[in-house]
Structures are given as structure tokens and as C-alpha cells.
Image (cartoon, grey):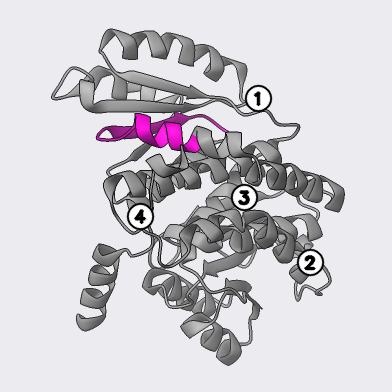
Amino acid sequence: MDEDVIVQDPSGMLEKINDLPLQLEKAWTGLWTQNLPFDINNFNRILIIGMGGSGIAGMLLKDYCQNSSIQIDTWADYQLPAWADQKTLIIAVSYSGDTEETLDAVKSAVAKKLTVFAITKGGKLAEMAKKEGFAVLKINYESSPRSAIGFLYGSLLTLASKLKIIELTEKDYFDALKELSLQVKDDKFNEQAKQLAMSINNKLPIVISYAPLLAVTKRWSNQLNENSNSFAFALSLPELSHNFIAGLENPFPEKTVVIYLESKYAFSRNVARTKILQQVLAKNQVTVIPLELNSNSQLIEQLLYIYLGDLVSYYLAGIYGVDPTPVEPIQFLKEGLAKSL
């Protein structure tokens, strides 16, 4: 089947996708031995700032930390929410260090004299950290932001574990990485991704799920957008059953395919709801592809879905004949904004 999906990949996107376990390992070992310059007992809320491929890391942590001892929120915009105060720990995640919205939000945090911790490869964010005196964790990895998800998310998970705001031990973490590594080497898992990419060819994919996989659905849609140059959307349960299902008749439901990510760790009523939802979708001639992955923990499930979604987007890029790395429209927009300053 390998010859059936040929991907023009001069920048080595597949290698970076398969690097996920190694990235996660290095993220843990790189941060675990470092002393943190703040006491979590001084805060009652964490606000994670980030956009796009960097911002998704904060969303993933928020999903994983649903039962955390401290409230975790995310922010993908300029400035800061008005409620951010001295009891709010600001974590700025920008792989490049030059994300305009994130830099502006950090400037607002500095102006309000809030505690900031940055995760970045360098850029203006690292320069600001040096000038303003806030802590920064430097990432040493060359890729696009979305391809550094293991470093970004792994660093946040390690930080949450060190701060004892979640019950995630080193053993739990590395057990998850061991299972993930096995799947990276498993041809069946790779073949599943190819088959799924073929099944959504020339379709509009809508990825749906419920907590604790909401950020994962967003990761899937983002990767399909950027790697495959494809329209894709993420919708969440139970919200979509209060609006989306009323708009299925027009204009072209037969071109839509719903990818449903099932979770062993979801609230039972959301699981029950999907059974009825699938009947509604079938009645309106919308194809549904349910996915379920075997896992022994919520973290393993989350990581496996991230990896599978990345592979699907990679192979769909091959089907569409596009290089999965460049994102010219995003670059065009950033350059245009820079000229408008």
C-alpha cells in the first residue's frame, strides 16, 4: 500500500511526526531537573497564552487537567482578559518567539507586573524575557511550530507534574511514551492513517468529540488545514447537538464526512448522545467514521490520537499532491501585518 500514497516531503515532515515520542522524552528530561522561579501556592489560576501550533499545547493541557487542583485557562488573542491578576500565573507558549498576539499579551502581563513563564525557541519573546527578567524555557529543535508539539506539550505536562497540580508521575509519563513508540513502529497503525486519508479525499472533514478530547479534535482540524491544505473543522459535544444537526440539509451534505473520536474517559451521557447523533447524520446522508483507540490511560489515548491525526493529514497531503510543510497563506498574512505596523 505504500506506493498508493506518495508524499512530496522535502522538509521531512514525516520524520518530525514520528519524532513525537522522542520530543516528549526530551521535554521531560530537559525541564524536570530545573528549579522553577515561582511558588505555585501563590496562584489560584494558570493562563496559557499561545496561537496556532503553539497554542494547541495549552488546550491539550487544559483538557488533560480537567480535575486539576488549580484552574487552567487558555488565551489566543492580543492583550489579556480583564480577570488576569496577581494570582494568575502566565505561561506564554510561542515556538518561534515572534508571534504578534502572544508578544502583545506578554507585554500586557509585564505592564500589570504578573508572573510570566515562557516556552520558546528564541526570538523576541526570549529577548523580552531577558530584558524584563521573567523565566524562559528554551527549546532546541528545528521545525515548524506544529511539528514541535512534543516539546511544547511535553514541557507543559512536565511543568504541571513538577507543580503537583496533576497526578502524573514520571512512570505514568514514560509508560505512555513507551506505548506511543510501539505504535510509531506499527505498520498497522500507519496503514490505518492511510486508509482514513483515502476515505476523506475530496470531502469536507468535520472532526467531533467530547471532553477530554476537545483539544485533540482541534489539533486534527488544524493539521488537516496546514499539512493537507484542506478545509476541516472541529465541533464539540454536547454543543453541536444543539445547532449543527439542524443545518445538515443544505447545501451538500454528501460531501461532508464526520470523523468521530471516541474516548474511554468521557462522561457517559455524551457517549450515549453520539449514538442518536449518528442516526441523525445517517438520515441526512452524512458519512460517519467512528474511531476508537485502545489505551490504558487518558494520556496514552490523547497522544495516540494526536499521532494518528498528524499521520492522516500527512497522507492526505500526498493524495492532494501538496508539500505538507509550507503554509504560504499564513506567512502572507503575517508579512502583511508586519508592514501595517
3 vs 1, front mark: 1
Secondary structure of the residue carrying tag 3 is: helix
Instruction: Give the mark nearer the N terminus: 3 vs 1.
Output: 3
Quarter-of-image position of residue 293: top right
Residue labelled with disc 1: 264
Query: What residue sits 43% from the left and 23% below the top?
Result: 289
Q: Which mark is residue 226?
A: 4
Residue labelled with disc 2: 29
The amino acid on which the numbered mark 3 sits, given as a three-letter code, is Leu
Query: What residue sits 77% from the left and 73% below the top?
Result: 36
Mark 3 to mark 4 CA distance (whole Å)? 22 Å
The spot of residue 74 in percent (x, y) is 51, 54
The spot of residue 127 in percent (x, y) is 53, 88
The amino acid on which the numbered mark 2 sits, given as a three-letter code, is Thr
Q: Is residue 331 magenta?
A: no
The amino acid on which the numbered mark 4 sits, given as a three-letter code, is Glu
User: Is residue 138 at all visible to an observer of this figure?
Assistant: yes
Magenta residues, start to end: 193-211
Secondary structure of the residue carrying tag 1 is: loop
The spot of residue 76 in percent (x, y) is 42, 58
Mark 1 to mark 4 CA distance (whole Å)? 29 Å
Does residue 309 appear to the left or right of 91 in the view shown? Answer: left
In front of the other: 154 or 167: 154
